[in-house]
Image (cartoon, rainbow, N blue to C red):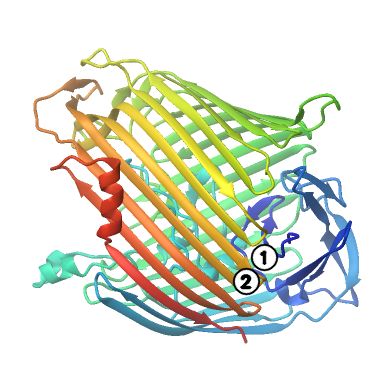
Amino acid sequence: MSLGGSLADATYTNGNSESKDWDGDWIAKTFKGNNFWSSEFFIPWTVVPMQKVEGSKRNIKFIAFRWLAIDEYGFGSTKTNWERETFIYDLEDLIIDNYESKKYSYFPYLTVAEDTVTNESIQKAGIDIFLNHGDGSQTNIAINPDFGQVETDQVVVNFSAIETFFSEKRAFFTENHSLFEVKGGRDDFYVINTRRIGGRPDYDCSRFEQSDICENNRKEYSDLDLALRHTIQKEKVDLGFLAASESDENFSKGRDYFAFRVRSNSPQNKVGFLATKTKSNFFNESSDVYSLDIENTAVKNTQISGYLLNSRKENSTGHGLRFDIKYIPNDKYENTVGFHYFDKDLDLNDMGYLQRNDQIKFYNRFEFDRNSYPKESLLRSRDSHISIFQTMTTDGKKSPKGVWTKTELSFKSNFNLDLSMSAKTEGKDTNITRKYIGSPYIQVMDEASFNAGFGSPKYKKFSFGGGFGFNKYSPYSSWDSDGRNNKSKRFNINYFPNDQLQFSFGVDDSKEEEWLKWIDTNRLGSFTKKRRNINFGMTFFQGTRHEFRLKNQSVMIKAEDPTPLISSLSGELSESDYLIDPFYVSENSLQMRYRYEISPLSYFYLVYTRGYSFYDDTDIFTYEDLYQDSWENPSNEVFTLKVRFKF
C-alpha cells in the first residue's frame, strides 16, 4: 500500500514468477504524523487456498518491505527481493495459529451495454462462485459469466506473420490461476492462453444459403454458458481441472475447453504435467496438447528448467522442447544457456499460444548487476545484459544470428538511463512470405541498432522521460536499394498535482525507409513508413472507493513511396512492374471508466468505450486527417453499466 492509500497486490510462484492480475480480499490503512507514518494491514486467512495442516500451529513464509519513493530505495526484513530466482524460498519462517480457512463467496452481476453506432444492445446476468473448502481445495464456478472487457487492450497494428499476444484481464481467469500457467520465456509459448476462451467464433458462411447475412453478422467474441475450475493443494502435489463451454451463435456453434494439471510442489524439484483439449463443435474437430515441465534448484547456484510439448490434431502430430540452465554464483552475476525446438506440426493455438513453430533457437544470456558504489559516485546501481542468439528452421534455414546488449543505469539523483545496442548478420527471413512454396523465405541484410532512453527523477508534481533510436541495414545489391533505415524518438510526461490525481501523455514517432510488407504469394512492397503513437491517460482516486480512469491510444501509419518487389526461390528480391499503392492506417481506442467500491470486492462500473479502425489506399492523408477522422467517425461507441456484488 502507498502513503496515499492506494492498494496493489500480486502473486509469486516458482521462486519469483510474478502475476499482478490477482485481486485479493484484503484491506490496509495508513496514518501520517508530523515526522512519521505507519500502516496497518488486515489479510483474511481465507484470502488464498492453502493445504490442510494438522495441529494448532502453521509455518508460513514472511517478509515486510518498505519502498522509499523519494530515493527509489527499498528496505526488507529478509535479505532478498523479488528479482531473485529463489525469492519465496529465501523468506523467513513465521509460526502462527492454524485458523479455519473455509469460506464461500458469491458474486452475482448484472451488465447492460449499448453500442450507439451499430445499435446493438446487451443485457446479461450471471454469477461467479468461489468455494474455499478449507482443506487445500478450491472450486470456482461461473454461470453465464460476463467476460466483456471493462479494461481495453493496448492498441496494436500488426502486419507481421506472428500473432500479437494479449494478457488476460478477466477476473475468473486471473484469480488463483497460477497452477495452470505453463509458458516459455518472453512469450515464446503458453500452453493455456485463456484469451482463446470466449474468442472469435468458428465461421464458414459458404455453408449457409444466407451467406451474406452470415458475413454481416460475424462476432469478434463468443458468450460463455459455463466455466469451472477446481484446484487441490496437498503436501506433495497440486492438482487442477479447468473447463469452459461457449454458447452457440446463429451461424456457429460454441467450442468446449478442458484442461487437467498436476504438479509436485517441492521447492527443490518440481515436475508438472498439463493436458488440454479443445472441441470445435462447428467443424466437428478436436485438438489435444500435452506438456511436461520440470524445474530443479537442488544443485547449488543452478536452476534447471525444461518443457516437453506434444500437440495432436485430426491429421497432424507435433513436438516441442525447451531447455534452460541458469547459473547464479552470486547476486552480481547470472548466466542462462537455452535451447528450444518446435517442429513444423506443433500447434498450441486452439487453447494456447505459440509465437511460431518450425524453429530451432540457441541463446546465451549474461546479466551483470552492481548495487553498491562509493559515496562520492553519482551511480546507485547498474544492470547489464548481453544476449547471443541464433535461430533457424527445422530444415536448417538460418535466420540472422546476433548479439544484443542493454545497460540500465540508476543515479543517486533518481535519474535513470537505458542504453541498448544490437548487431545481426545476413540471414533468411522465413516468416514474411508465410511459407509460400515458390519463395519460402527472403534474404535479409546485416543490421546494427542503437537505442537510448531516460527517465527523470520524480519532482514534486511531475516527471518526464524520452529516448531515441535507429536501425541501419546494408543495401540490397539485387535491386535499387539504399538500405533500410529506421529512426525513432519518443517523449512522455507525468503530472500529479496531488496524491489522488495523475495525468500522463506520450508521443512516439518513427520513420522507416525501405520497410518491407508482404502483399501475397512472393510479392512484397517496399515503403517509406511513418508511424505516430499518441497516448493520454488520467487516473483519479477519491478515498479508497471512487476510481476514475481515462485512457486514449492512437496509432497512425502512413506507408508511402511504394516500390513493388518480387522474391525468388532463393530469396533474392528484385523490382517488378505490378501496381502497388500507398496506404494509410489509423487505430484509436478511448475508454472512460468509473468504478465505485460498494464494499470490499463489490463494485459498480460505468464505462464508455469508443473505437475506430481505418484503412485507405485511394487517397492521401496527414496525421491530422487520420486523428480527426478517428474522432468524427467511430466504428463503435459503447456505454456499459455493470454491478458486481460479493456475498
Residue 55 drawn above or below residue 550: below
Is 495 in front, or is 238? 495
Amino acid at dot 2: Thr
Q: Work out how far the residue at label 2 is from the one at label 1, CA to CA, in angstroms.
A: 7 Å
Residue 647 in the image: x percent, y percent?
62, 87
Q: Using the rendered view, name the quadrant where residue 153 is placed.
A: bottom left
Q: What element carries label 1?
A: strand
Q: Mark 1 points at which residue?
A: 238
Badge 1 local density, few (<14 within 10 Å), some, or many (20+)? some
Q: Residue at x 71, y 37 (%)?
A: 414
Verify CB contact (< 8 Å) between mark 2 and mark 1. Answer: yes
Is 43 in front, or is 95? 43
Amino acid at dot 1: Asp
Q: Which residue is drawn at 11% across and 67% down?
A: 212
Residue 191 drawn above or below residue 570: below
Residue 77 in the image: x percent, y percent?
88, 52
Q: Name the residue under label 2.
A: 231
Residue 577 in the image: x percent, y percent?
9, 26
